[in-house]
Amino acid sequence: MSAPRHRGWFRGYAIGYLVFLYAPVVLLPVFAFNDSAIIAFPLTGFTTAHFGQLWAAEAMHGALVSSLKVAVAAAAISTVLGICAARASARYEFPGRRPIIGFIMLPLVLPEIIVAVALLVVLVQLGFSLSLWTVVLGHVLVCTPFSIAILSSAFLNLDRSLEEASQDLGEGRAMTFLRVTLPLVAPGIVASLLIGFTISLDEFIIAFFLTGTEPTLPVYIWSQLRFTAKLPGVMALGCLMLIASLALLGAAEYFRRRAQRQTGETGGYL
Amino acid sequence: MTDDDRPRGRALITLDRVEKRFGDVAALGGVSAEIMEGEFFSLLGPSGCGKTTLLRLIAGFDEPTGGAIAIDGQPMAGVPANLRPTNMVFQSYAIFPHLNVAQNVAYGLRRLRLGRAETARRVDEALGMVDLAGYGSRAAHALSGGQRQRVALARALIMRPRVLLLDEPLSALDKKLREQMQVELRRLQRAVGITFVLVTHDQEEALIMSDRIAVMFEGRIAQLASPETLYRRPVSRAVASFIGVMNFFDATVTGEAGGLIELDVAGLGRVAIPPEQAPGGVNGAAASVGIRPEMLTVLFSETDRAEHEVTGEVVEAVYYGDMTYYDLKLPGADRPATVSMRNTAGRRVLRPGDAARVGWGRESVILLAERGAGPAGR
């Protein structure tokens, strides 16, 4: 029988895949605490000095604040745009609905470098000066398709008779949206905000092209990589970002499950 | 027509040649009717007959493409659902999943700005009305189907509407619960005195609950009458076979004498009936008659006599415990007739192949203008 041997192969494949996926991520904290300026084995000792350096690096703080500003703005704007588009495409039939949604979703598959270069050319031609706002603009373009994809399923899952029931009970369109629609798609909105935030936070190409004098965090990290001495600091930074993203994911999952418990419905958006 | 069929009191909803087209498809082809204040009115028909479309037009979720709807004398054209004196119990119940029972029931009270105490009092009152007292803090998803239905009812009734619209409210419930709710809904309607308009495809449900029923086919009202008239005096074969079980026999109108219509009925023989028993009118010689299974009697004893008698043969006997349904082949009739007999003490059950004498009276015959090939449904 070949079944046990097959099982062995599959197990080996699965383990190899996981190692390939996560070993580099695991190395981050290892070298972040290693007492050496060079990223190499053997390890030489334990230190938290690299984190101390980060604490002192003013430029990094600036980049972090820039990134957070951009990410919050991009997530909020793309989610608002996503709510409008998803609601329209889920509720109403209008001429050109499919092509319009198709064009909005296109940046999902367009190479980012093309979007970035094209945006740069247009913005410069129009006489805009590069700033964090131009980065936000580029990120909104990239994040909106994700928001629409997430929110469309939220709006499509919404039973239309719930909105009709609200109108039947005396509420107009605006109050119906506030009292029924919005709370019921809230898990989708939270998911859209978190996804937009995450995408914007680690987006590099567009930020690299469109950023002015204030770099975002990925652009700052890239600039640091040219100096070997700064590498352990980057490792420490990466370590903190890893913890932050895990915390973010955990929070998203917590909210999703709480929403699920409230409505008693299954299936989520994350 | 009996007295029950004439609308009594004041018309609350007036439908004047109401039409609704979706693209090229006419869902409603000019419906006119008056629904009276305080009555339990049903729209009955198979799926796709336009009954739900009509209900949604009354509620204000859609606008008619022709004709006019007035509620309480007010034309409803252009009046949105939230400003109409109607409330609806949806087929899916549409319970707000993010709110608990009390919040669901109180949903429509926000605009009235009643204050916390008065709101709570009215919610308790509404929940008590549907036997859900003490359920206020339950989460919506922790309710059974029957409870969701009651919450939907309480949420609509708390608004004290002029008209309560019910869109197949019982179809999602199991048989036992449905029968219980039919009686309860009827009791509730009498207690609150609000006009109920019920949409249903279940003829039994409509018969049990309604004061008057509009039977709809293909976007039109085929007959609007009391349950008893619908059952006893259907105006067409379609209505006759949709309501209960009806045996159809081909018949020929042979003449009129002394105010009576003379018929020759295949399988039953000659009979003369008064014009009331031709509620759809007479139209030419080719016609059919309908006769209900309980209007035919198997004459078990030699000494049993009936106004008219024929002898047939049992094709099939279906035993239900309290009743036995016989399919009987009558000489001259093209299909078997169904006869229902109560299984009273000592009465035997015939077997297929047995001969049976069948008795009937001339009052039990309904003359229908059309002939048709459709078998009698059970």
Image (spheres, coloured by chain):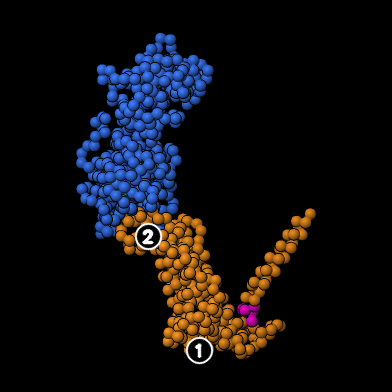
Q: Residue at x 30, y 60 (%)?
A: A172
Instruction: In the rendered view, tell whether residue B220 sits above or below residue B297.
Output: below
Q: What amino acid type should be assigned to the residue bearing mark 1? A: Glu
Judging depth in this view, the residue of A260 and B375 nearest the camera is B375
Lower position in the chain sequence, tag 2 or tag 1? 1
Q: List x then y, in percent, for residue B48.
A: 40, 44
Viewer can see residue B207: yes
Kind of element beneath mark 2: helix
Quick one: which chain is orange? A
The chain painted blue is B
Q: Residue at x 29, y 22 (%)?
A: B274
Q: Residue at x 60, y 86 (%)?
A: A225
Q: Is residue B378 visible?
A: no
Label 1 secondary element: helix
Total count of labels? 2
Q: Which percent across, then down, holds residue B5?
A: 26, 33
* Lateral position of residue B341 relative to residue A110, left or right: left
Q: Which residue is mark 2?
A: A180
What is the span of residues highlighted in magenta in the rendered image? A27-31
